[in-house]
Amino acid sequence: MVTPVLLLAALALPARAATLATAFTDDAGAWTGGSVASGVLGARDGAVALHPGAMRGFHLAARVRLAEGTRLWFSAGAATLSATYAPGGGLVLGEDGAPLPLGEQGWTADAAPLFDGAAPDVLHTSDGWFLYREVAGSVHAATSPDGVTWTDRGAVVAGSAPDAVDDGGQVTLYYGCPDRDAVCRATSPDGLAFTTEGPVLSTGGPPDVTVAPLSDGGWRLWYADGGGLAGASSTDGRVWTASGGIADASRLGTLDVATFAGGLAGVWTTTDGLSGTDAAPDADLADPTGDRGPLLSPGFATWSPDVPVAPSLARDGDTWHLYVEAVQGGVPRVGHLLGTPLPGAWVGLVADWDGALLTVTWGNGARLVTPLAAADAVYFGAAGLLEIDEAQLTYELAAEPGDTGDTGGADTGDTADTADTGDTGTADTGDTATDTAATDTDTALVADTAADPALLGAAELTGEPGGCGCAAPGTLRGAGGPLLALALLFVRRRR
């Protein structure tokens, strides 16, 4: 018997909305393909799939890893995200791409430092690579065709702690002004012959400066003056407005950032090594929830037992490069490290589709976006071994012709709802939500079980393998909350 409360709940909901979730404790539930062992769904050189039916939007949260192999992919409709765990590997979704997050990189240091000097900064442009560093009160330059083999070009300006950006085809250099507490600016058509333009921002001490044009417009400048990190903003990179302190020096010392489509990555020095963030939630880097580290610890290179400082982060396609200052024999040196993606870590994937655009976030990395017009299933596959230990899909099915949705009465075209027998009001184990003797198949409860499965949220995709991070049984998030729970109970009791 259906109560009025349940009838009202069903009327309040869009037709055919549901949440499918599992921690894979016993079997794959609604997933097809692969096999379950110890709370993990695995597929080797293959794929697993979930088929809710023709959807008009969904939210997917899953925790995955590549224990072996080099490539993982996720697809919905005509859109595919690939994550390649190999040297030079990265993320690709449609026309959008990004490197794998910093926290998923293994760092290999060169056998020897590149140069004497301090506070290195590296710029990668279409004309090649430029490295700037501080040597005895001047900024020295070096050039390279590949970011690995360098040629020293000597001093280019008097100053300290340089940071260079590609500004519309010319190299713009920001640095500590000589003999004053201020940031100076200079420009060059070739990265070697500079025209100085004088101070652009006064600081409270000799600045260690970092500058970046932001992907959403405008410019951001960060500078450390000994007491902490402060920021400034600009519309053109020339006129700057200080915005005050951001963090103390113990958290964001000697910061460097790299911007790319869809993300802002940062690295900085702490007391125990080099830390970073893969996709900063705000331009001030004030939110520590994205902090990862240490990425490098003391002893990161055979030629330096100390903590690396003054990092510079650069990207060549999907490959990360790190340049750091470290001490060798009491002398500051500039060294280079190359990042290589490492399989074997559990990574959270969150995908949202609003019927027009698919937005995917991989781990703590950048958000990638691509158009998507239709989808009736989601797939995970891999070359090698793919593992999933938690997954949740919240979706709404597209209305079929003549389908008015479950409103408490018979579905349009359903001639057998009133003739169901043996229905005691409890959920049938293994119920696939198909009305017996009916012509209408209701796919809103593909994974119906006798007890609601524990559900996970996107914010809970962390922790040890097999960890659920679950809500209380019967709790639904992101799909109507208690009303949807009542609606699901109502649909079960109809059978």
Image: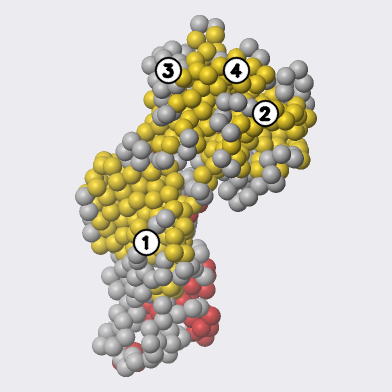
Give the left or right position of residue 484, taking residue 401 as reference.
Answer: right
User: Disc 4 and disc 1: Cα gap in Å?
Assistant: 50 Å
User: Disc 3 and disc 1: Cα gap in Å?
Assistant: 41 Å
Q: Earlier in the sequence, mark 2 or mark 3?
A: 2
Mark 1, secondary structure of its residue = strand
Give the left or right position of residue 131, taking residue 100 as reference.
Answer: right
Q: Earlier in the sequence, mark 4 or mark 2?
A: 4
Residue 133 on image: x %, y %? 57, 21
Residue 481 to residue 349: above or below: below
Residue type for callout 1: Ala
Mark 3 vs mark 4: give the one in front.
Answer: 4
Return the residue at label 2. 195
Return the residue at label 4. 155
Residue type for callout 4: Ala
Return the residue at label 3. 301
Return the residue at label 1. 79
Residue 227 to residue 399: above or below: above
Residue type for callout 3: Ala
Residue 380 to residue 286: above or below: below
Q: Dots 2 and 3: beta carbons under 8 Å?
A: no
Residue type for callout 2: Thr
User: Disc 3 and disc 4: Cα gap in Å?
Assistant: 27 Å
